[in-house]
Amino acid sequence: MSISELDAKHIWHPLTQHHTSSPPIPIKCASGAVLYAEDGREFIDGIASWYTAVYGHCHPDIIKAVSEQMQQLDQVVFTGFTHAPATKLAQKLFEILPPNQQKMFFNDNGSTAVEAGIKMALQYHHNKGQKRKVLIALEDGFHGDTFGAMSVSGLSVYNGPFEDYFLKVVRIPTPKGANNEQVASTLQELIATHDCAAFVYEPLVQGAAGMKMYDAAGLSLLLDICKAKDIITIADEVMTGFGKTGKHFASLHINTYPDIMCLSKALTAGMLPMSLTTCSQHIYDAFLDEEVTKGFFHAHTYSANPLACTAAIAGIDLLLSTGIQERIKAIEQQHHAFAKALLKHSKASGVRVKGVILALELEVTMERYGQKRQALYDYFMDLGVCLRPLGNTIYVLPPYVITDTQLKKVYTAIENALDHF
């Protein structure tokens, strides 16, 4: 049987209505910014495979490091043991995280990083003898598909069937500059009427909402209000982390740093699954007690997998390299130039850029995963460009190693789509 036949027989794909969807395209291999299909077609990976392979697919430095590590130590339980890849990763990562971050907890993926962060915040208050059960989140946020992460997410297209089972959450609008004081007032009112434990947010860019970008000064104001009330601030940097906003982390654009950060996706450069929940010292200290059960009794089988840690170390080395930093700046400059050209097009609106992220709305009404959106996706694929529009929102978040020629092809595909639809 062919790959496609075996896939159709046995595999259930994410975000897919199999009753109506087209068969998935078998990919044979990938290199740099290009995916190579079994049938000979090539696709420029304009979204770095969901923001993971930011240094390009199958980067030789990462392959070499992981290959050497797998000959020494592949996996060991991380309760009662530790190892060099984990400690070396911690050393490297804390050099580039906001300076208040001091401890890290290992998880499997972005959703579980957020889940751990929420549990840390709730238990922090429990350990201090405080009954705080309400979480604060931004409207239209998205934080993952486990129950805690879904609870603080605001997109019913993903969460609709499960909303009756969520944790207690209250929502506030995103600060846009002009409405900063109004949003701050709304937050203060909610704090006055609810026992709020934590505020969970995507800093500056709400990815799944359509790469919506919002105000750094407004977010700092909200964080200051929360910190004054001992409400734990949790920055979900699963999408934004590791250079995508022009700084190593989006939280570095903001005057007030979070108490907890959630990291995944580009953490391991797309090589292996892993995530981290990092926190400040005062969060960690709230779990230190003679009573054993006040510890954080939460675990994942593959916590701190040595191979994944090694991939992350190699990824950070690449992130800090002159070559990658220059490419991040070059992509941002080219995004701005393209955004300026898009402003002249009648079918493009809301054009915006943050770091290597470019997004716009196609002035055509379409459902998030409806037939028109599928046609737009197929149109890009027919042009050899892999983009995944969120309804009528078209966005680009390419691998940093994408060439100028490849990036130009992505831009041309978008221009063609604006004229075609």
Image (tube, rainbow, N blue to C red):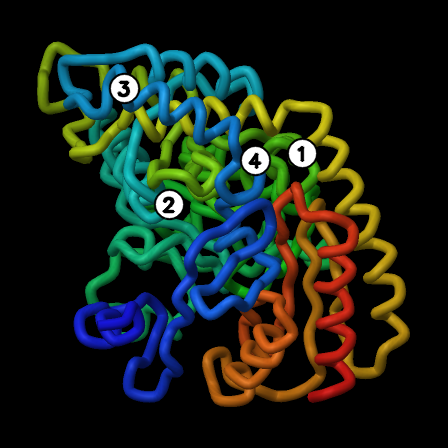
Quadrant containing the N terminus is: bottom left
The residue under label 3 is 71
From mark 4 to mark 2, how far is it between C-alphas? 14 Å
142 or 51: nearer the eye? 51
| Residue at x-position 50% and y-position 51% | 30
Q: Earlier in the sequence, mark 4 or mark 2?
A: 2
From mark 3 to mark 1, how far is it between C-alphas? 34 Å
Q: Earlier in the sequence, mark 2 or mark 1?
A: 2
379 or 80: nearer the eye? 379
Q: Position of 122 compared to 262: left or right?
A: left
| Disc 4, SS | loop
Q: Earlier in the sequence, mark 3 or mark 4?
A: 3
From mark 3 to mark 4, how far is it between C-alphas? 28 Å
Q: Earlier in the sequence, mark 3 or mark 2?
A: 3
Q: Earlier in the sequence, mark 3 or mark 1?
A: 3
From mark 4 to mark 1, how far is it between C-alphas? 8 Å
The residue under label 2 is 110
Please state which of the two labelled residues, at mark 3 or mark 4, is closer to the viewer.
Answer: 3
| Disc 1, SS | loop
The residue under label 4 is 242
